[in-house]
Amino acid sequence: MAIYSCNLKSVGKTTHAPGTAGAYLRYISRPDAEPVLLSDHIPLDPLEARTWMDGQERAMRKNGRVIDKIRLAIPRELNLAERSALIEDFMNDLTGGRVPWYAAIHQTGKDAHNPHAHVAVHDRAIDTGQRLLRLSDSTRDRIKAGLPGPKAAEWIRERWEAQANLALERAGHDVRIDRRTLEAQGIDRAPTIHEGPGERHIHANIGRPDSRLRVNGCGRVIDYPMIDAGRLRREFNAQIIDLNFARAARSKNPVTAAWASFEKEQFARDSALEQRLAAGRQERTAERREASRAFTEERDGLRTETRFEALKVSAGIQAKFMDRRQVLRLRQKQERDALRDRHARLLARLARNLSRVVKERQGAERQRQIDRHRHERSRLAREYKAERETAKAQIKGRYAPQIARVVRQRTDHLARLRKEHREAAKGDDAIRQEREAEREYARRVLEEKIKSMPKEGRPETKPQHSDALRRALEQAQRQEQARSERGKGGGRSRT
């Protein structure tokens, strides 16, 4: 189901740490995301792109805007080639081929149900080096410069809507995206709120997340416990979705009411199934964490014993060498005093006949004594260090096999758990596919039932735009049709 999502942010030299823009390019192009990379006037290789961006940042003024970040939700109806073409057409429409940009499309693995693109725009014209798009400028400055918009975010959102709908039309799809609010579109449906990947992950794999106070980048404290009022965003969205279904089920149009009742029942079954599967995932997460914690505590205990014994032995060695050091200091002091007295007596005897040769000979003798004492102290320090390192190595050697055994057991045990959990995840996917088949069968039964309705009981025309959830239901049907055409049925359609 095609959805509209377009987000614009920026990275500046005064608002972010040095190298943030280059690190962002490296992050969106990370190999584990299996991205499709696109660029214009920026090296396509991630490492070279980061080096290029770091160089551009160093050459900018101290309060310069390094990049503008655009995050886009790509319609799922488009295939891989059409998605890449859409991003290229959109960026060429914005920049006219004059501004460097770098894009990464994420559409595999966990992002298969949510294809999206991250775009970094370095707003410096390749021919003049001046800012061209000026996406971070105020409305007044954009109007003064004669730029479209006049708000940059609204201009970006409008161009993305136009290019995405054009791509959908070229691909032969009837679905369209709309940047306007539901109210502006004339849809009588309460909007849901964004959950966020962090909350979804915690809810699905760990447990029910708790709302906490947060401090944003500007230092403002956000009171999420008060905002959430004890409800998760998922729970709030479920209530809104149920309310929307209830509104549609009371429609005077029997077809709309039938489909709304159907979707409400299916949504309840889907929610119950996901709660049961989430409980299993949470148990597996707890099992994995408990196993890791137990092995980690045993390993850390052995390491603590190693450090404690090493400190104890080092203290004994240090005490022994402290005695030797005191003896050495006392002897060297006595030797220095003896040499000083001898030179003093000689000076007294030869006070009248003291020559330059005698002074040089006495200075050389004092220097030899200094060098010999320094060598003795250095030798004692080397002996102390060698004995201490030998003792530490012996202690570490006694504990190293035990630590290695615990680490090996931890690795093997977690590997077995991961294998078991992957098998369990495959079982969850099989259950979801069975649920999809059950849902598809129920949908066909309802379609046949609607066809058998007397004509006076169902209108010839489709429900009007004001019917609640009509558009969402049609989108869900198109999603299921597209999923069946692709072969496997992966995710569920949620209105």
Image (cartoon, helix red, strand yellow):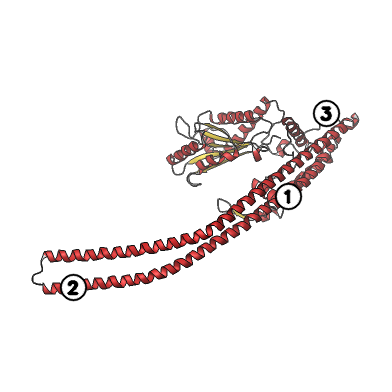
Residue 428 at x, y percent in the picture? 74, 43
Name the residue at 51% across, 63% down.
307
Sequence-first tag of 1 and 2:
1
Reading the image, the residue beneath label 3 is 461
Secondary element at tag 1: helix
Name the residue at 71% across, 27% down.
173
Figure quadrant of residue 452: top right
Reading the image, the residue beneath label 1 is 280
**Number of other residues with Cα within 10 Å of mark 3, as a class: few under 14, some 14 to 19, many 20 or more:** few
Determine whether label 1 and label 2 are within 8 Å by CB.
Answer: no
The answer to whether residue 12 is above or below residue 385 is above
Give the residue furthest to the left. 353
Sequence-first tag of 2 and 3:
2
| Residue type pointed to by label 3 | Thr
| Residue type pointed to by label 2 | Arg
Figure quadrant of residue 325: bottom left
Residue 406 at x, y percent in the picture? 59, 56
Choose mark 1 or mark 3, whichever is in front.
1
Choose mark 2 or mark 3, whichever is in front.
2
Sequence-first tag of 1 and 3:
1
Reading the image, the residue beneath label 2 is 342
Name the residue at 58% across, 54% down.
407
Secondary element at tag 3: loop
The answer to whether residue 8 is above or below residue 390 is above
Quadrant location, the C terminus: top right
**Residue 137 can be seen in this image:** no
Q: Nearer the viewer, residue 441 or 192?
A: 441
Residue 459 at x, y percent in the picture? 86, 30
